């Protein structure tokens, strides 16, 4: 392995937004940093992972290796990856608006339909790319989708990715049945067929279901199945009974919801009364979260859905997409990092760590 190139990253602040990531529990911390040799002082997210504290090193390495294999405009990338002692440093583009989960922390009643349409369109582009390579993502959640001030939407977190190509005979499988314990972390977003673990298995459409769950969350302000009585047990029962999430607006507001509202929820009910989502948006969500795999739309079908008609027209010009996003994002304040440590004055300088710094060069 060659030595790490002579780069220097200076830490600006600690990146920690609204408890959307429990990095500390995983032995990692994310910083806002910049490359001191870059005259433009572009910001990056520098994640430092203590390998000795990782509960599952093999899964983490799998996540890193996917970055090498995947290359798409709407997928997260790694700018640098290097090791100092037992700490792995991962440098990624900095998303000034944070993740979708971060955005919801600032807008607890949900975000506007045009922004949701952009997020859906761009993540569908990423899913189309993955599907062409026979890959199921299996971890599409609001905290894994990042929003950049240039209008790009990026999907991250590849440790749960799985290939539809059999590792035994190299043949493309129509359905797969793999389920790992780690998937339980994303259980609120998982399609029923993944949770059931029955003989029918699951395929690319399982990612479509998860995307529909994210769409509902962005519109409603919270995940449909969060804080249910009896927790995940209620969620599992609901999905077994064929429950399908819906968009909450004035067309879906019932007398029962109004009667059950209290001082804590009355403001949310008032918000529901004031909004009305388009019939195209309602249809789009229904096509995503159908409990029946056969009835659920494919990625290609969703890309042609009327809800995304406007974006399909301008999709050939990235600048038009960026300009449209700039207008929409003007309504939203960028969530600022909260300082978890004060008076940070730390520079990761390879000139001081040449002897114990290793450039992984993607060689594991």
Image (spheres, rainbow, N blue to C red):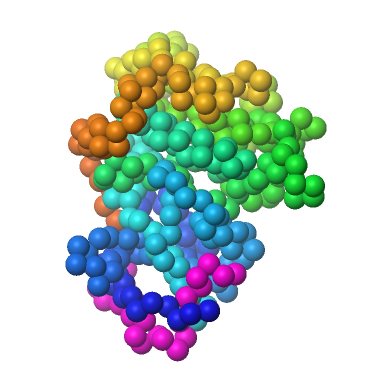
Q: Compared to 336, does 355 lie above or below? A: below
Q: Is residue 342 visible?
A: no
At horizontal 41% and vertical 66% (from top left) the residue drawn is 80
Q: Is residue 191 left or right of residue 30?
A: right
At horizontal 47% and vertical 66% (from top left) the residue drawn is 28
Q: Which quadrant of the figure has residue 272?
A: top left
Q: Is residue 335 left or right of residue 249?
A: left
Q: Is residue 146 left or right of residue 197?
A: left
Picture mark count: 0
Q: Compared to 74, does 204 lie above or below? A: above
Residue 109, how many percent across, how many down? Answer: 34, 30
Which contiguous range is marked in magenta?
340-364
Query: Between 155 and 222, which is closer to the camera in this rendering?
Result: 155
Residue 249, how many percent across, how many down? Answer: 38, 17
Q: Compared to 282, does 303 lie above or below? A: below
Residue 262, how many percent across, how many down? Answer: 39, 25
Q: Compared to 193, does 255 lie above or below? A: above
Q: Is residue 144 visible?
A: yes
Per the image, is 358 magenta? yes
Query: Between 86 and 222, which is closer to the camera in this rendering?
Result: 86
At horizontal 47% and vertical 50% (from top left) the residue drawn is 71
At horizontal 70% and vertical 44% (from top left) the residue drawn is 165
Q: Which quadrant of the figure has residue 216?
A: top left
Tell me the chief SS of the magenta region.
Answer: loop
């Amino acid at each position: 392995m060659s030595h790490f190139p002579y780069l220097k990253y200076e830490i600006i602040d600690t990146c920690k937004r609204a408890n959307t990531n429990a990095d500390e529990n995983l032995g990692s911390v994310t910083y806002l940093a910049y490359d001191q040799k870059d005259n433009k002082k572009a910001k990056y997210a520098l994640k430092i992972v203590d390998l000795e504290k990782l509960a599952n090193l093999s899964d983490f390495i799998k996540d890193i290796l996917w970055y090498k294999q995947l290359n798409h405009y709407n997928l997260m990338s790694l700018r640098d990856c290097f090791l100092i002692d037992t700490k792995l440093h991962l440098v990624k583009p900095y998303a000034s608006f944070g993740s979708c989960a971060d955005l919801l922390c600032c807008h607890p009643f949900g975000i506007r339909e045009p922004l949701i349409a952009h997020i859906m369109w761009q993540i569908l582009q990423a899913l189309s790319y993955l599907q062409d390579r026979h890959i199921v993502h299996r971890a599409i959640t609001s905290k894994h989708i990042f929003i950049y001030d240039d209008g790009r939407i990026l999907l991250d977190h590849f440790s749960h990715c799985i290939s539809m190509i059999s590792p035994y005979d190299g043949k493309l499988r129509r359905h797969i049945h793999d389920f790992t314990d780690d998937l339980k972390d994303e259980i609120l977003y998982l399609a029923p067929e993944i949770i059931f673990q029955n003989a029918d298995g699951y395929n690319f459409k399982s990612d479509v279901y998860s995307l529909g769950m994210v769409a509902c969350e962005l519109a409603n302000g919270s995940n449909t199945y969060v804080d249910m009585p009896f927790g995940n047990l209620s969620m599992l029962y609901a999905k077994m009974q064929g429950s399908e999430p819906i968009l909450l607006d004035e067309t879906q507001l019932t007398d029962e919801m109004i009667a059950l509202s209290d001082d804590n929820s009355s403001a949310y009910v008032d918000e529901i009364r004031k909004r009305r989502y388009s019939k195209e948006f309602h249809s789009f969500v229904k096509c995503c979260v159908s409990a029946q795999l056969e009835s659920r739309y494919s990625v290609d079908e969703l890309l042609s859905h009327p809800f995304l008609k406007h974006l399909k027209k301008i999709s050939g010009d990235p600048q038009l997409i960026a300009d449209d996003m700039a207008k929409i994002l003007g309504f939203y304040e960028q969530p600022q990092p909260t300082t978890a440590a004060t008076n940070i004055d730390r520079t990761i300088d390879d000139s001081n760590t040449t002897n114990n710094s290793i450039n992984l060069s993607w060689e594991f």
